[in-house]
Image: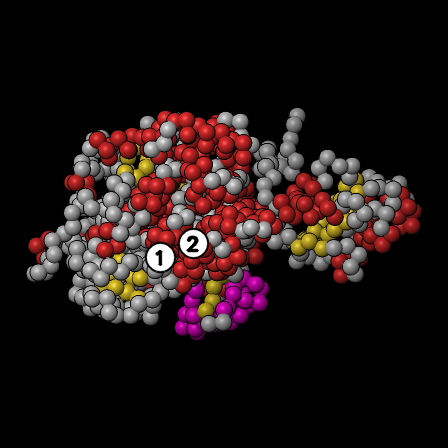
Amino acid sequence: MTTFERDATGLRPPWPFTGRQDELELIRGSVAGGRHGIVVTGPAGRGKTRLVTEAVRGTDCARATGTPETRDLPFAAFVHLLPDPVSLHRAVQLLSGVRLLLVDDAHLLDDASAALVHQLAVHGRTRLLVVATEGTRARGAITRLWTGELLPRLDLEPLPREETAQLLAAGAGALEALTVNRLHRLCQGDLRLLRELVGAVREQGLLSRVPDSDEWEWRGPVPVTPTVRERLADLLDRAGPGERATLDRLAFGEPLPVDADTLDLGALEVLEADGLVHIDDHGTASLAHPLHGPVLRSVAGRLRARRLARTPSDRTAALETESATLARAIAETDVRAVPASVGEWLVTEGIGIPAPHAAVRARFARLRGQLREAASWAREGLRTTPEDHACHLELALSTAQSGEAGRRVAERDDMERVRTRGIGWEGASTQTPGRGRGVPQADGAERGAAQVGGPERGAVQVGGPERGAAQADAPENVAAQADAPENVAVQLDAPQNAAAQADRSEPVVTRTGADGSRAPVLPAAPQDPGSAVRRGNPAGRGLSGPAAVRRQNPGGSGPSGSAAVRRQNPGGSGPSGSAAVRRGTPGGRPANPSAEPAGRPAPPDPDTPTPCSAGAATWWAAARGDLDAALEAVGAEPYDAVRLGAPERAAGRLTGVFAAHADALAQGDGPALDRAARALEERGFLLFAAEAYAQAAQAHRDPGAARISRTRSVALARRCQGARTPALAGLVLGELTARQRQIVTLAAAGLTNRQIAEKLTLSVRTVGNHLYGAYTRLGASDRDALSCLVELPEAQPV
C-alpha cells in the first residue's frame, strides 16, 4: 500500500511545493560548502518542515524529530541514530561523522537531545538544519543556537499573496482573485489551515464556477470543520462573564468603539489580554484574527445572527464611507492599500454590493495592477446591475491588459470583419456574469446609441429594500452613473480613466466565441486621436489622470464631503491640478431626453469614438499586437500613449509623476525612468512602475543598470496578476528594433506573413527578413516559439 508523506490520515497527495525560492536557496547555501547550517523558525503551519525537506531533497541527510510525548526521555529523538545507553560525550563523537543532520520540531526536544544539538553546533563538524516553532517554550540549549550566534536564523515570513495564489493554482486549481484574497486573509500564512479550508469548501460544495470562465469562486460562510473548531477552541469555548457576547457583537459589527454602552469593558479587557481582541490607537475594538469573525458568525444561530447583524442602512453608510475613501485615494494619486473591509465582507458572505461601489473597487484594484482582482470586482457589480456601464468598462480594461486577453484575441479576425463589413451582432451573446441576461446589440451607428443602465442604477440595494441608494450625487460614489443630465470630470495626475463616462460613451458589449469565451466588441478606432479630448471641451484642454472620474450633478451644485474634489467652471478658468474637478461639458445625454435643459447642444454622434470607448479599444488593440491601432485609439487618457511607448502624444497633458515618466521616456533617459518608476511604485501603481522599469532597461546604456531595471520590472510584473502589456513584452523581446518587436508580436498572435504585410503595408519579403533577424536575436528556431517568448516568464496564475 502506498501513502503520501504527512497526509496519511486524509489519503490525499500533498500539494506541489510552490514559492519560497529565495528561502530555499538560502537554506541550501547554508548547508553547503564550509557553512555550519541554519535555524529556521516561524509559527505553526508556516511550512517550515516542507521547506527544509525540499531543501535537503536528494542529499545524504540524517533526521531527528522532537515530540511532546518524549520530552522527558533522554536522547529520545536520536534513538535510531545512537546505541543505548550512551553518554553525551559519546553521542557527540558518534554524530560528528554525520555530514548533514536535520532536527525538526527542536522546541520539543528533551534536555539531553537539546544539549547534543548545541554541542554539535559548537564543534562545527556536522552541518545542522534546525527547525523550531515560535510561540512555544524551547530548551535554552536550542534558543542559544541563534542568540549565541552559533548558527544564523531564518524567521519564516507568511507566504506572500502572490505565492499563495501560485500554491492554490498548483494544488487546488483555478480560483478567482477574490477567493484567493479571502483564503490568504483568513489563513494569515498558516498553510495547513489553508489546505484544510480548501478541502472543506470543496467537500461541502461551496465552490461555484465563475460564468464565462474556467475559474471557481467561494461565496458564503466559512465551514467550521473539526480541525477548525479545534484550532479555535480557545475562542469558541470562552465561558467568562460577557466574553462570548462581546465576541459575537464584534463578529457582526467590528470595528466597534470601546464604549460601555456598546461593549462589556471588563470582558473586553480579558479578551485583549488573551490576544483575542485588538484595540487600535483610535479606541476601536476588533477581533485579533481575520478567521475569528467568520467562524463566530457561522456558529451563531439564525435568531442570534438576525439580532446582531448590521441593518441595511448601516451597510449603506459603511459602503459610502469606503467608496469615498477609495475615491479620495485615487484623486490624490496614491493607491497604496486602503482598509475597506465592509465591501469584502458583503461579497464573501454572498450578500452582494451595489454596482457603483464595485466599479470604484475595480478601478482602484486596476490602478494598483491587480488586474484579476479588478475583473472580479467588476463581475460582482454586474451581478447586482447587469447593465452597469462602469463595471463593463472596468472588466474590459482589466481583461485587455491581463493574460486573459490572450485567449480572446483568437476572435480578432471575426471582430475586425464585423466592424469593417458592417455585420450586425444580433446573434452575439451579452450574458452578464451571474445573471444570464442578454441584450441584442444593434448594428452600426445604432450600437453606439444603445442605452446602458437606467435611472434606477443609482439605487442599487444591499441586503434589503431600505438599503437604499447609491447616492448618485454624493462625492463618494464617483463610479460612473450614466443617467444624470450633467457630468463632472475629476482631473487627476494619473491617466487611467477609471470611472465610466457612461453618458458620453458607447456601451461595452461582448460576444461569445466558438470556445465559449467572451470578448468585448470594440468600437472603431478614432480618426483623430485628439477629437475625443476636444469633445465637450471648447478650450481644447486634455484630461489627465488615472481616474478621470465622471459623476452626476443633476442640480449643478458643487460636490461636498471630499477635500480632494473641487469644481471648475465650464470655461476652464477654475483651479486645476491633481484633484481638480471639471463640471460636465456640453454633450452629455440625460436619461430622459425630454428633460434636457433648453439651449443644451444635441447629443454627440454615436459613431464618434468617446474617451471611454477609446480606452477599451486601445488595450484590446494592444492585446492583438496592433500597436498602431492602439495608439490611434488613445483618447482622453494620454498616459496610455506613454505606456505604449509614444510619449510625444501626451506632451503637455500630464502632471506630477506621470509627466516625469513621459519626459524621461521622450528623452530616452534611463536613470530618470528609474526614478519615475520608483515614484510610481511608492504610490502603489505597480503595473505602471513595472512598465517604466522595462522602458528604463531599454534606455540604459550601461548593461549593469539595464539588468537591474529589467530585474525590478519582472519582480513587479509578477505581482500584477498576469499582466500582459507591450512594455512588459519588451522584457523578453530584448534588443529588437521597434519594427521587429511589432512584427514579432503580430506573428506570436497568430498572423501569417501576408496578413502582417497587409496590416503594416509592407512586402511579404520584408516581413520575412524582419522575422529572420528576430529569430537570430531571440534564439528562436521558428514562429511557433514566439508565443512563449513574448509572454512574461513565470507570471503568477491568479
Percent coordinates x, y for residue 503 in the rendering: 20, 52
Residue 561 numbered tag: none
Residue 244 seen from this side: no
Check residue 263 for magenta coloring.
yes
* Residue carrying label 2: 666
Q: Are marks 1 and 2 in contact (CB under 8 Å)?
A: yes
Compared to 478, does 505 lie above or below?
above
Residue at mark 1 to residue at mark 2: CA–CA distance: 9 Å
Viewer-closest of 579 and 167 = 579
The disc, 1 or 2, on the residue closer to the chain's N-terminal end is 1
Viewer-closest of 49 and 792 = 792
Image quarter hosting the N terminus:
top right
Residue 522 seen from this side: yes
Q: Is residue 129 left or right of residue 460?
A: right
Specify few, some or many for label 2: CA neighbours under 10 Å numbering under 14, 14-19, or 20 or more.
Answer: some
Q: Is residue 33 left or right of residue 691?
A: right
Q: Secondary structure at mark 1?
A: loop
* Residue carrying label 1: 651
Q: Secondary structure at mark 2?
A: helix
Viewer-closest of 345 and 239 = 345
Compared to 21, does 290 lie above or below?
below
Compared to 106, does 538 lie above or below?
below
Q: Residue at point 75% right, 37% down?
A: 59
Percent coordinates x, y for residue 555 in the rendering: 17, 65
Image: magenta residue range: 255-280
Specify few, some or many for label 1: CA neighbours under 10 Å numbering under 14, 14-19, or 20 or more.
Answer: some
Percent coordinates x, y for residue 523 in the rendering: 25, 41
Q: Amino acid at mark 1?
A: Ala
Viewer-closest of 182 and 457 = 457
Q: Is residue 460 left or right of residue 21?
A: left
